[in-house]
Amino acid sequence: MSYRKKPLIGIIMGSSSDSKIMQGAAKLLNEFKVKHEDQIVSAHRTPSRLTDYAIHAEKSGFRVIIAGAGGSAHLPGMIASHTIIPVIGVPIMVYNDKSENASNSFKSSAFGGLDSLLSISEMPTGSTVVTVGVNKSTNAGLYAIKILSNEFSDLKKKLKTHKINQHKSVITESEKMKRMGLTKFAKKKFG
């Protein structure tokens, strides 16, 4: 079995507006050439689809599910309650109110993402969901790769290279800042 040919990671989100945040996980998985399957599954609007998805994920042999949701954020916990596959929850601060009175612009949740974070991180004992920071889907993708690397040694090597590259990047930027001075460096980097 190859993680390049068959999706071993599922990425789900409660709404199409969540794709704005969840694409970070997909981009990282693509960088590592890890195939994934992406779907919209609403815990509130399509509860039977959620059950069907859990069955599909197990039959498909997924190793990890990354689930992003905003507001009350029930999707990660609900999918975890239907499967033994590890679930990584991504609390989302930005969501789109689909009611008729809503404008077309994206809105922040009433509590700035804290509602989503608490909904996902405070799962009851026995119903585990790993939680990353608010809007941190890239971290969820990286954590999923770490889980897969226990099974695929070449992924473990890629992760080690990734860590080395992160280290080198910080050293390079530090040297550049030292040469330029903080004010010039910040102005050039951030405008």
Image (cartoon, helix red, strand yellow):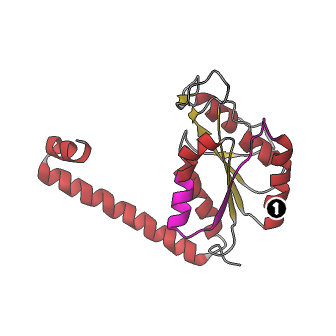
Res 133 quadrant in image? top right
Residue 74 image point, x, y percent = 74, 37
Q: Which residues are magenta?
A: 24-46
Residue where numbered disc 1 is placed: 58
- Residue that appears at 82% across and 53% down: 54
Confirm whether the magenta stretch covers residue 82. no
Residue 5 image point, x, y percent = 66, 75
Quadrant position of the C terminus in the picture: top left
Residue 154 image point, x, y percent = 56, 77
Secondary element under disc 1, as helix, strand or loop, is helix
Q: Characterize the local packing of mark 1: few (<14), some (14-19) or many (20 or more) Cα atoms within 10 angstroms.
A: some
Would residue 109 be visible to someone looking at this image?
A: yes
In the image, taking residue 44 as reference, residue 190 lies left or right, namely left
- Residue that appears at 24% across and 47% down: 189
Res 9 quadrant in image? bottom right
Residue 107 image point, x, y percent = 54, 28
The image shows residue 68, relative to residue 149, as above or below, that is: above
Of residue 26 and residue 164, the one placed in the foreground of this image is 26
The image shows residue 99, relative to residue 67, as above or below, that is: above
In the image, taking residue 119 as reference, residue 143 lies left or right, namely left
Of residue 22 and residue 116, the one placed in the foreground of this image is 22
Amino acid on which disc 1 is placed: Glu
